[in-house]
Image (cartoon, rainbow, N blue to C red):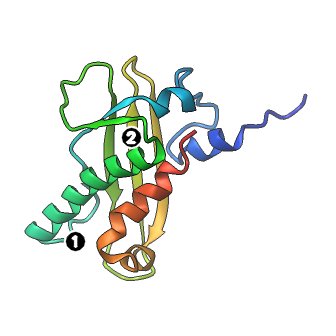
């Protein structure tokens, strides 16, 4: 029996949490994503809470803003919204899995959880060292979400 091969885009989209046999939704196409409306929902930080109140608020605000901006840069014909009531929109939740300490060599995982209006779900995830993220300073969230957006079809 010939082994099944996955396209590069499919292989990149499957995350560690996905089962190897998981199939992408049929509606998950570049043409559809390029003109879709995306609703950016409340971002989440998972793991140890290493940031104080205003710093955490700043990071969450940047996650919401810059994940939407990254999608818009990837798909200039897309519409970005924060109105959860938008009908027919792809729902996006930006997620950061934080490391156990703020040490430059530790890694965080950035993820975009996308839910299509008809119910299909896809998660894009990538690990970054804290040092890599820190080097981008004020543009850190843009850097992280641009890297994830590049993985979209």
Q: Position of residue 8 (x, y in %)?
A: 69, 44
Q: Which is nearer the eye, 30 or 101? A: 30
Which quadrant of the rendered structure holds the C terminus?
Answer: top right
Image position of 42 with respect to 131: above or below = above
- Residue, far left: 53
Q: Is residue 43 above or below residue 107?
A: above
**Label 1 SS:** loop
Q: Is residue 8 visible?
A: yes
Can residue 99 be seen in the rendering of this structure?
Answer: no
Residue 142, how many percent across, how many down?
Answer: 37, 61
Left or right of 22? Residue 60 is: left
* 67 sits left or right of 48 in the view: right
Q: Label 1: few (<14), some or many (≥20) within 10 Å?
A: few
Reading the image, the residue beneath label 2 is 113
Q: Relative to 125, is 26 above or below?
A: above
Q: Residue at x 43, y 41 (%)?
A: 76
Mark 2 in CB contact with mark 1 (< 8 angstroms) = no
Q: Answer with mark 2 or mark 1, whichever residue precedes in sequence.
A: 1
Residue 143 is left or right of residue 16, and the answer is left
Going by the picture, which residue comes out furthest to the front?
77
Query: What residue do we see at 55% from left, 28% from top?
Result: 31
Tell us which disc is closer to us: 2 or 1. 2
Q: Position of residue 14 (x, y in %)?
A: 57, 42
Secondary structure type for disc 2: strand
Distance between mark 2 and mark 1 Cα atoms: 23 Å
- What residue is disc 1 on? 50
Which residue does the image show at 33% across and 57% down from the upper left?
96
Q: Position of residue 79 (x, y in %)?
A: 33, 34
Query: Where, by quadrant of the figure, is residue 92 drawn?
Result: top left
How crowded pointer 2 is (Cα within 10 Å; few <14, some 14-19, many 20+) is rated as some
Residue nearest the observer in this picture, 51 or 94: 94
């Amino acid at each position: 029996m010939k082994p099944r091969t996955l396209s590069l885009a499919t292989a990149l989209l499957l995350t560690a949490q996905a089962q190897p046999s998981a199939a992408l939704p049929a509606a998950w196409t570049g043409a559809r994503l390029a003109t879709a409306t995306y609703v950016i929902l409340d971002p989440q930080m998972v793991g140890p809470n290493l940031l104080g109140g205003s710093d955490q608020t700043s990071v969450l605000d940047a996650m919401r803003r810059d994940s939407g901006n990254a999608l818009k840069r990837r798909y200039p014909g897309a519409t970005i919204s924060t109105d959860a009531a938008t009908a027919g929109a792809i729902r996006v939740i930006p997620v950061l899995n934080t490391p156990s300490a703020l040490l430059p060599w530790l890694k965080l995982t950035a993820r975009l959880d996308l839910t299509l209006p008809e119910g299909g779900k896809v998660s894009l995830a990538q690990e970054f060292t804290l040092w890599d993220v820190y080097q981008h300073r004020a543009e850190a969230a843009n850097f992280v979400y641009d890297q994830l957006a590049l993985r979209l079809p």
